[in-house]
Every structure is written in C-alpha cells, then in structure tokens.
Image (tube, rainbow, N blue to C red):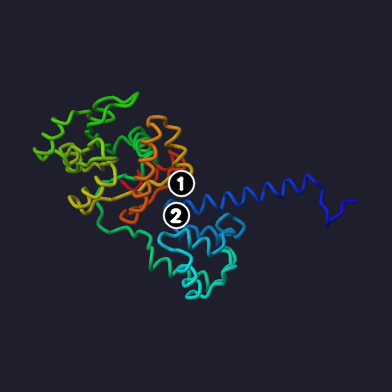
Amino acid sequence: MVDAQHPPEVDRVAASRRAVEARRARASLKRDIATRVVSPQEALRRAIADPTSPAGTLRVPDFLTALPAIGESKRDRILAELGISPVKRLGGLGVRQRRTLAQWLDTRMPEPTPRPHRSRLVVLAGPTAVGKGTVAEQIRREHPEILLSVSATTRPPRPGEVDGEHYFFVDDARFDAMVAGGELLEHATVHNKYRYGTPRGPIEQALAAGRSVLLEIDLQGARQVRRAAPDATLVFLLPPSWDELVQRLVGRGTEDAEERARRLRTAKRELAAQGEFDFHVVNAEVAEAARQVAALAS
C-alpha cells in the first residue's frame, strides 16, 4: 500500500519538476508583460479563461510590478485602491475584482482601437527579428493582388537577398539624391547605422489603380507614413514571447554579440510604441500571421 503522506520518490521528483516549470512559465510571462509583448489585458483574459495557466497562477502583486513604472510602493497603493488582497492570484479574482482591475488597466494602458476610414495602404512594422520580412514574403507569394513595396537601403545585402526584389541596395550618394528629389514616402536611419526609405512612385500608381499596398518598414518609417498618409492602416507584428524574440535574433546569426545587444535594446523601445498602431498580429506561425495581415489589406 502507498502511504499518501509519503509519496514515492518518482512522484516527488515529478511534482518538483512541474513546480519548476510553472515558475519558469510565470517568469517568462512577467518578461512578456514587462517588455509589452503581452498586454496586461491579454494576461488577465488568459487568467480568466484558465485559472491554472501561468497567467492564472500569477500573483496579482507580481503582475502589477511587471507593468512599466510600477514599483513596490505604488503596487501596494494600487492593491489598496482596487480592494485586492496581496495574496490573490489573477485566476482567483472574483467577478467584481476582475472588472475593477480591467477598468484600471484600460484607463492607464488602453489597448489600440482601429480608426475608421482606413485606406488600402497597409504598414507592417514591429521589433527587430520579429519576422516582418518573412511574413511580407509569404504575403507576396500568396496574395499577388497586394503590391509589396520594395524599400531602398544603404545596408549591404544579406546572403540570398536580390537587388530590386528584396531591396534596392544603393549607396549614400544615391540615397541623398532620392531624399532631395522627394522620391521617398518615408526614410529613416535604423539602429543608428543604415538608412531605409520607401519609393513613392510605385505606391501611388498601385493605389490609383485600386490595388492594396503593403509596406514592411521600421517604427520610424511607420510614423512618417502616418503623418504623410493619416488614413494608412498600421499593423504591429508581435513575437509570441520575449524569449522567442531573443532566440530568433540569436539564431539568425547575422549580427555579432554587441550588435545583438543593441538590437534588443531597440526592440524594447519599439515594443513600447505598439499602442500607436491600429492592429496587433502575433507572429507565432508565419502562414497565419500573413493571413491576418493580408485580410487587413483587403
């Protein structure tokens, strides 16, 4: 007979392993919330849907301190203001507490609301290494009716990239001439190193012919397009998690350690700007992400 108070060693090991995995999952979720890969509202929705999930078992004080600019003293004031005990977990909140917390989040960290009267000009942006180019290429193959704009850049081509297909690779003098001649809808210096720009002519011709146009550009460029074309549809591509974004950047192998560290710092700043966009799409699976972006261009 098995002693219920003294389970076999194999059970204790399995329980310990599950506890470690659960702690790691909660730690990963807190990183996602802190870097804005996952919105606090989405974390709360996950907790409500499954109280046993990493979100559901996350203590409310840990959830609050994962939010930007909230330290322990501010956290305690918020808990008192919302009437939530510090021992509560997100998945264990009552209906009233869930509603109160959701309202507090929406007031201070509102999720994006799509604007009416959007045009067929779709801007796809997101943090470095999130896979914007891969998603855009999938759309190019699957949706020939959508014009994928080809950017000009001063950076050298990566292995496999073709001039005129992936980018127009130009030198600084030619880029200066394009800027001076008003040939670019937007242009920006990315990672304090290379310049990128979107040729204006092909876009205007395609829109005039009734086609949808997709721009795959960086955050600075997206902001310029919004100023130049306020009715453009802005889509922010998110990674499934911060850890996955780091892994993608390391696995890409196209940057050295110093460059990777710099790009990750940039990624955090880019993720903080996602509230400026009309729609968010998570790039967990390229084909599905491409399908969602293409649907927004129709």
Residue 242 numbered tag: 1
Q: Is residue 221 above or below residue 33?
A: above
Residue occupying image coordinates x 24% and y 41%:
211
When the figure is inspected, residue 19 is found, relative to residue 135, above or below; the finding is below
Give 58 or 86, whichever is nearer the viewer.
86
Viewer-closest of 151 and 251: 251
Q: Earlier in the sequence, mark 1 or mark 2?
A: 2
Residue nearer the viewer, 239 or 289: 239
- Which residue is the extreme one toward the left? 181
Residue occupying the point 15% across, 37% down: 201
| Gap in angstroms between the C-alphas marked 1 and 2 | 9 Å
Q: Residue at x 34, y 36 (%)?
A: 133
Q: Amino acid at mark 1?
A: Trp
Q: Position of residue 106 (x, y in %)?
A: 40, 66
Residue 187 position by quadrant: top left
* Left or right of 275, for residue 2: right
- Residue 157 in which image quadrant: top left
For residue 125, the mark is none
Q: Position of residue 86 (x, y in %)?
A: 56, 69
Element assignment for label 2: helix
Other residues around mark 1 within 10 Å, as few (<14) / some (14–19) / many (≥20):
many
Contact flag, marks 1 and 2 (Cβ < 8 Å): yes
Dot 2 corresponds to which residue?
A: 34
Residue lying at the far right of the rendered structure: 1
Q: SS for tag 1?
A: helix
Q: Residue at x 45, y 68 (%)?
A: 74
Q: Amino acid at mark 2?
A: Ala
